[in-house]
Image (spheres, rainbow, N blue to C red):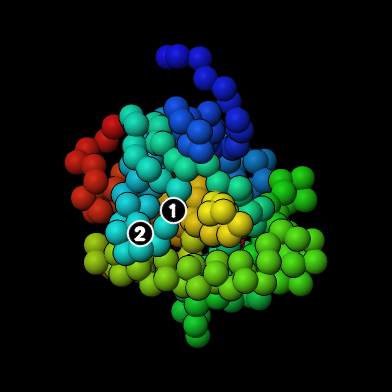
Amino acid sequence: MTRRKKIYEGKAKILYEGPEPGTLIQYFKDDTTAFDAKKKAVLEGKGVINNRISEYVMTRLNSIGIQNHFIRRLNLREQLIREVEIIPLEVVCRNIAAGSLSTRFGLPEGQPLPRSIIEFYYKDDKLHDPMVAEEHITAFNWASTQEIDDMMALTLRVNDFLTGMFGAVGITLVDFKIEYGRIWEGDFARVILADEISPDSCRLWDSATNEKLDKDRFRRDLGNVIESYTEVARRLGIMKEMP
Ligand code: C5P
């Protein structure tokens, strides 16, 4: 492998300098963390599956006009992406109560929500990604009011599309987390989707049995994590067999 400049290393991915200005290479690791990285493991092959699933999802979203940073997959673990100015927020969209929403409001896991709910969290591991309101986002200059509106509208479109896409293969999209970045077009900053969309960042349940096919298998020690991720890829028609 040629030596490349590492731009950033996160818990599950590494960003390297790309071949042309304005591009980066996103490398998917097998490392898996939960609960603020208090729980860690290396799940062999996870990076390969998430690279493929995220490629598939981002390509489908692009095809319906939802711009994102994905350019093309380079190899098993890497994809070429557009460099964006990352907005330091995690945008969570929920359709069914689970996870921290269930804990916060005492809602039984699996209870459908009256409508989809979007939440913003400030991306900062040291602060444990606190939930924030629009007021914090604009006051601390993380994003403008217009950008918040754009992220909300885009997130609802992503939710509609992904709900249908997964629904068609017998998977219920319970909730997911996405991230956005800015690309500059002259003086205008456009908000586009960044990061990844994979079973690491979504709750995906088998529609017939409610079996979990996502990272909750790791969080809750349910076993068969890689098998479940592979099942998601298989149903989407991406991977015929384990990497
Ligand atoms: O834990 P919580 O219920 O708030 O998570 C909501 C959704 O966001 C889940 O699909 C989870 O996998 C995802 N998430 C994530 N990264 C985080 C926090 C949540 O991908 N740091």
Name the residue at 75% across, 60% down: 141
Q: Distance between the residues labelled 1 and 2?
A: 8 Å
In the rendered structure, find residue 235 and report the number of the disc placed on it.
none
Which residue was labeled with disc 1?
Answer: 68
- Along the viewing direction, whichever of 222 and 3 lies nearer the viewer: 3
Amino acid carrying label 2: it is: Leu
Tell me whether the residue at label 1 lies in contact with that at label 2, contact meaning CB atoms closer than 8 angstroms.
Answer: yes
Looking at this view, name the residue that lies furthest to the right: 139
Q: Could you tell me which secondary element the residue under label 2 belongs to?
A: helix
Name the residue at 53% across, 54% down: 185
**Quadrant assignment for the C terminus:** top left
Q: Could you tell me which secondary element the residue under label 1 belongs to?
A: loop
Q: Position of residue 238 (x, y in %)?
A: 24, 46
Q: Quadrant of ligand 1?
A: bottom right
Question: Is label 2's Cβ within 8 Å of ligand 1?
Answer: no
Which residue was labeled with disc 2?
Answer: 61
Q: Where is residue 86 in the image (x, y as percent from the top left)?
A: 61, 49
Q: Look at the image and tell me whether residue 122 can be seen.
A: yes
Name the residue at 77% across, 45% down: 126
